[in-house]
Structures are given as C-alpha cells and as structure tokens.
Image (cartoon, rainbow, N blue to C red):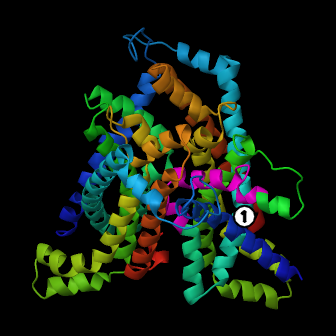
Amino acid sequence: MRRALPRLLLGLPALAMLTLFFVLPYVEMVAMSFRAPAAGQPFGAGYTVMHYTRALGDPIYFGALIRSLITGAVITALCLLISLPLALHLARLKGRWHVVFYACIVSPLLIGVLVRNFGWMLVVTVDGPMNRWLLAAGLIERPLRVLFTQGIVVMALVHVFTPFMVLPIATALRNINPALRDASTSLGAGRFETFWRVTLPLAFPGIQAGVVLVFVLSVAAFVTPALLGGQGIAYMPSVVVRELIGSFAWPFGAALAVVMAISTLAIVTIFTLLTQRLAERTRA
Amino acid sequence: MIRALGAIGLGLIYAFLLLPLVAVVAASLTAGELMRVPPQGLSLRWFIRFLESETFREALILSLRVAATTVVVTVTLAMLAALCHRALSRKLGAAFRVAMTLPLLLPELLTAIGLLFFLNSLGLGKSLTGLQIGHVVIAFPFAFLAIVAALEQVDPALEEASCSLGAGGLETFRRVVLPLAKPGMLTGGLFAFIVSFDMFTISLLLKPIGGNTLPLALFDFLTYDFDPTAAAAATLSVIFALLGVLVIERAVGLRQAF
C-alpha cells in the first residue's frame, strides 16, 4: 500500500488534462446551447431555450437529423455484414498469414479519413477504374455517376468504420474456447448450427460493442459527406458546422449538436437494452 | 463450391478495403497531367510539385510541428496514466481505461465543437495552442491503449524482484519498467503522430487564422483544383501509415497494439 499511493498519483496529469479539455468542453457545449443569440457576435448575454424549439420544429433541421440517423443505421448494418466474415476469417488464421490479413484490416485505420475518401473519389469518377471495369464486364452501358450521391457517402463510411467493427468482434472470437465448438460438433450439431448457437452468442459482446461504436461515429461523421456528398444532401454534421463556422451562430449550432448527441444516445440505449434481452434469451 | 464462393466474397471484401489506398498511391505516380487511375506512365514529378507548392509546404510543416508536439505530450501523459492503470484493481482499472479512452469513443466533431467554445472562453480561440490541445486530447487514447497493452506483457514479478533486491521505486522504473515499456511507447508515439498528422475535424474548427494543416490544405485543394498534387499529398499519409504498421509489428506485434 505504501507503494501504491504514488502510483495512483501518476494518473492525475492525464485525468486533469481530460477533465479540463474534454469534460469541461462538453459542459460548455451544453451551456452554449442555452445562450441568447446576438447580432455581430457568436453569442449574447442571457439564456433561452429558443434554439431547441427551432432545432426540433424546423423541418430542415429535423429532416437532416432523421437522414443522419437512418444513414448511420444503414452504415452500421453494412459494416456488420462485411465485418463478420472478416472477423471469422481472422480467427481461423495462424502465424504469418494472420499478421498479413490483420495488417490489411488495421492499416486503413492509420490513414486519415480524408485520404481514404479521396481514394474513393478516384475509384468512382466517370473515367475511373470502377466504371471501366463495369463497362468492360458489360454490366453497364454508360458510366455511372455516383460521386456526390448518398450511395458513395454510405460506401466510403462503411470503408472508414469497418476496422472499428472487426476489431471488437475479432477480440471476442479470440476469447472463445475452441473446446466449446468441438463439443458442439461432436454432439452432432452441423457447422451452421454451431456457428448460430455457439459462436455467435459468445461473440455477441464484441458485436454489440462494434455496432454501438460504429453507429455513434457514423451519425456524427463530418468529412465524408462534406467531400463526397456534394451540396445537395444535408446531413446533420454539415448543418452544424455550417451554423458554427459559416453563420457564426454558436448557440444554435450547439443546440443542434446536443440534439444530435442525445438522439444518438437514446437509440444506442434502446438498442443495448433490446439486444441484451435477446442475448440472455439465446443463452438460456 | 460454397467454399469457393466464400473465398471469392472474402477476396472482394479485402479488395474493397485496400482499393482506395492503392488508387491514391497509383494516381500520385502518374507522368501525365490528369489525376486518374491507372496512371499514365510513372514519375515522381507530382511529389516535386507538391514540395514546390508553398501552400502545401507550409501546411506540411505546421502538421509535422503539431504532430511532433502531440507525440511528446501524449506519450508522457499516457506513460504515467498507464503506470497508474497497472496499480489499480481489475474493476477500477476497467473504469479508468474507459475514462481514458473516451475521446476515441465519442465523435471527433462533438469534441471539436465543445473545445471551440471552451478554448474561446479561455482566450485560446483560433490559436496554435488551442489547436495543439485539441490534437493532444484526440491522440491521447491511442497512445494510452498502446502503452497499456505493452505493459500488460511485463511480468509484475520483475518489479517485485527489483524492489526486493534493494532498488528504489524510481530506480526500478528507470532500469526495469522503462526498458520493457519502450516498444509500447514507440507504438503509442507512432499512433499519436499518425492520428495527429491526419486529423481533420478538430483542425477545421480550431485552426489558427491563416494556419492550415496538411489535411485542411488537401481538402481545399480537392474542392477547387483537381490535379495529381493532391494524390502526392495523400500518398504521404499512406506511406506514414505503412511504415507505422511495419514498425509496430516489429516492436510489439500488431495484435497487441490494437
């Protein structure tokens, strides 16, 4: 115990840094959302709830919120769809090959979102490789124009967030005792049944963590819609940034951000409660 | 048959993951005037053009400066926090770990907005210090996780042995824990560097007036011009990431780091 105390003190600088520059800014954001607006300044004196009534009442903002939430759900579902096979594949590999494929999955994580989005721009432009391959294969008759559509935004974000989904699932799969699967097969269950009734429920905590993380991050993704989405489609993050930097309306921008954060949190909570129940039922 | 289809599907997913990165690197190597994949002939002329462009050069220097400071600050804070994490009980340790990684779990945009307001109230709005603080906050969890993972490989018995052989706490740290934690610090520092070098949203909201980081300059360039200089700028990020992965794999093994 004599030695433990100074050890605990070592955590203080980081804790102080995060309290000061992470927790307090969030508090400040909430406080800002109740500030009165002012002409010629980011915010005025006094407090009001008018920004919230405007954020929720105006169909432009409400529509952008709903669009962002739905797009976030679609992205999360697609991420899960391609991450499960990837995680299962990783779990089967050993040695050198494991490292190679692991690197394929984690190295995009180390490359900025902007650069990866830019890569998609190059791939899908009218005379880019995607159109050329599709034309050569005879699947399309004229080049597809996908840049600045919702489709390319979704695809690029699935690409951005897939590692966030694969890693927790792969960790959960790695922690499953292989003896359980062997037991299931030797008791007569087929490969599919073993997967469905043994592997999947045991990997569930990882899946749940991945789903929550990807949903939270994709709803608030700013760069990708800004670069690939064009001007036509309004997502909540772009709307918020426009209010903050473009119109210089800090309190209203803050209120929009808080609304976005709270709706995301509400959906995540409902999802967690529902799936928790589901998980308990499969286990029973 | 099913197996073959599965393999093809898996191959397609891996291709999906790597395609945009390959496209960026390929486009930067073109000898032609247009940014397209596959490139027309091979050359490094667009990298030279990139270095000759004053906008990009200034942005690159600012990015490297901010990233270097971020590495020093985050690795120091993360090393101390990781040592604290090691001393905590299992349950407390888990809570501490979540608290330390919060900036990674919440959207960068929200953190950026909060910081924009908060730094402004401190009088640090639109300053280099403010930008630096934002980078440290976002990069910190990456360094922390890497160092915690590396310290987990260190047997506590080694420290006890050192202490029971008469070394004090500081000496044990300097001669036993620090050398063993080095790979983790290297990995954590690399992570912090790469994350800071590529950070966009925080930089957009907190950048000092007239100061663009490389990702901001690249974004502006992509919105207004569209020549292979952009691909050369982006390739820089890809190269850093690949070097990072190689060094991390050598130092601690990829699986321990993520």
Pinpoint residue B49: horizontal percent, then vertical percent: 42, 53
In front: B235, or A178? B235
Quarter of the view holding residue B83: bottom left
Image vertical order of residue A75 relative to residue B114, above or below: below
Instruction: Residue at 52% x, 67% y: name it.
Output: A107
Q: Tell me the chief SS of the magenta region.
A: helix
Pinpoint residue B166: horizontal percent, then vertical percent: 9, 85
Chain of the residue displaying label 1: A
For the question of whether residue A275 can be seen, the reply is: no
User: In which quadrant will I find the N terminus of chain B?
Assistant: bottom right
Image vertical order of residue B51 relative to residue A246, above or below: below
Q: Looking at the picture, which amino acid does disc 1 mark?
A: Ile
Q: Is residue A175 left or right of residue A279?
A: left
Which residue is tagged 1?
A82
Q: Residues within 10 Å of mark 1 (few under 14, many from 20)?
A: some
Q: Is residue B235 left or right of residue B92?
A: right
Instruction: Residue at 54% x, 48% y: name it.
Output: B227
Pinpoint residue B219: horizontal percent, then vertical percent: 50, 43
Quarter of the view holding residue B94: bottom left
Instruction: Residue at 50% x, 66% y: name it.
Output: B43
- SS at mark 1? helix
In front: B19, or B37? B37
How many labels, in total?
Answer: 1
Pinpoint residue A62: horizontal percent, then vertical percent: 68, 25
Query: Is A208 contained in the magenta span?
Result: no
Q: Is residue B25 left or right of residue B55?
A: right
In the displayed orientation, state which residue is furthest to the bottom: A186
Image vertical order of residue A66 relative to residue A88, above or below: above
Instruction: Residue at 71% x, 42% y: name it.
Output: A71
In the displayed orientation, state which residue is furthest to the top: A39
The boundaries of the magenta stretch are: A107-131
